[in-house]
Image: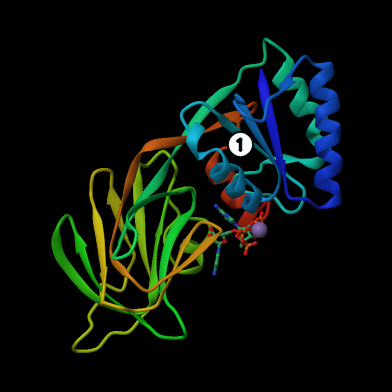
Amino acid sequence: MKYTILNRGDRLSQELTETFHRLAAEGGMTMDQHVPDIVISIGGDGTMLHAFHSHIHLLDKVSFVGVHTGHLGFYADWKATEIAELVKRMTTPDVEMKIVKYPIAEIEIVTKKAGKEVFYALNEFTIRGDDGKTLVAKINVNLEDFEMFRGDGICISTPSGSTAYNKSLQGALLHPSIEALQIAEIASINNRVYRTLGSSMILPKHHICDIFPREDQKLQLSVDHMNIQRDDILSIRSQVSELKVSFARYRPFPFWNRVRAAFIGNEPME
Ligand code: NAP
Ligand code: MN
């Protein structure tokens, strides 16, 4: 098995990386930065976002594993103290490994200067006004007019990203077995001219959301942890991608258990 590691860069994550390499070599794993089978992210969910984007060209070949060196993460569910256990499970032939696949978002941006660009998001795509200005945009769903939006912005999240920015926007948490995208508003203005739905909405696979910002606005776009500023956006199309991201699971940790552990706490109830 060929693996590579991406870590957050702090001392603990660096140390764990060294430990992992040592244990992995003892267990017969080989390091391969170029064509790994497994990508190990050591740090937090933010580190997994980096790991995902640096292996986007290998998405149909690699599986990701996350170790957290801070708080429990949604993509990083192995504890720092469990690194030996993780390597043991990875190198023991009879340990059952499951690959779980999560949907990701495909975002196609059309600009005046650069033409068409495609991005993939593991968590979400957001569009906001820049310079403290609101975003003004027409929103179409499945090629038909839906609403005229004015407000801070729009967040389009994947199911596994629903626990991130989307949750702060009162969006629902979506189980990653559901192939869908969630559109959540960021502080919409509602009056007689601009009227928006107000609640977040969930689009299934093959449905399309097009955003047409009013011309020449300065806009802030984000794809996961990356930010892009543009003033020449013509349209943005979002949909569930045909590609999926794979996570290697060496033990079960169901999504709703992670939700409870992260947001409620694991204390037993009365
Ligand atoms: P960051 O500002 O360091 O991260 C913000 C927080 O989001 C961190 O605690 C991060 O966990 C957590 N997070 C990331 N993905 C998550 C997920 N799928 N479920 C639950 N929590 C998650 O920036 P970053 O580490 O580069 O992460 C970028 C993400 O930050 C974006 O994709 C967006 O979802 C989120 N964000 C949230 C808000 C908000 O809620 N108001 C605003 C901007 C961005 P770790 O500490 O483990 O990395
Ligand atoms: Mn972070």
**In this orientation, does residue 249 appear?**
yes
On the image, the x and y values in percent for residue 117 come to 36, 53
On the image, the x and y values in percent for residue 229 come to 46, 70
Please give the name of the residue rendered at 17% of the width and 54% of the height, measured from the top-left corner.
142
Depth order, front residue of 62/161? 62
The reply, left or right, for residue 154 in relation to residue 83 is: left
Residue 128's image quarter?
Answer: bottom left
Please give the name of the residue rendered at 62% of the width and 26% of the height, measured from the top-left corner.
36
Q: What residue type is labelled 1?
A: Phe
Which image quadrant: the C terminus?
Answer: bottom right
**Label 1's element?**
loop
Please give the name of the residue rendered at 17% of the width and 67% of the height, measured from the top-left corner.
146
Decide: is 155 above or below 52: below
How many numbered circles does the render carry? Answer: 1
Mark 1 beta carbon near ligand 1 (under 8 Å): no
Which image quadrant: the N terminus?
Answer: top right
Residue 247's image quarter?
Answer: top right
Please give the name of the residue rendered at 48% of the width and 36% of the height, measured from the top-left corner.
57
How is the model colour-coded? Answer: rainbow
Decide: is 99 above or below 115: above
Q: Furthest residue to the front?
A: 113
**In this orientation, does residue 186 appear?**
no
Decide: is 1 above or below 105: above
The reply, left or right, for residue 1 in relation to residue 134 is: right
Within 10 Å of the Cα at label 1, are there few (<14), some (14-19), or many (20+) other Cα atoms? few
On the image, the x and y values in percent for residue 82 come to 80, 34
On the image, the x and y values in percent for residue 44 come to 68, 50
Decide: is 152 above or below 233: below
Quadrant for ligand 1 reads bottom right
Residue position marked by numbered label 1 in the rendering: 253
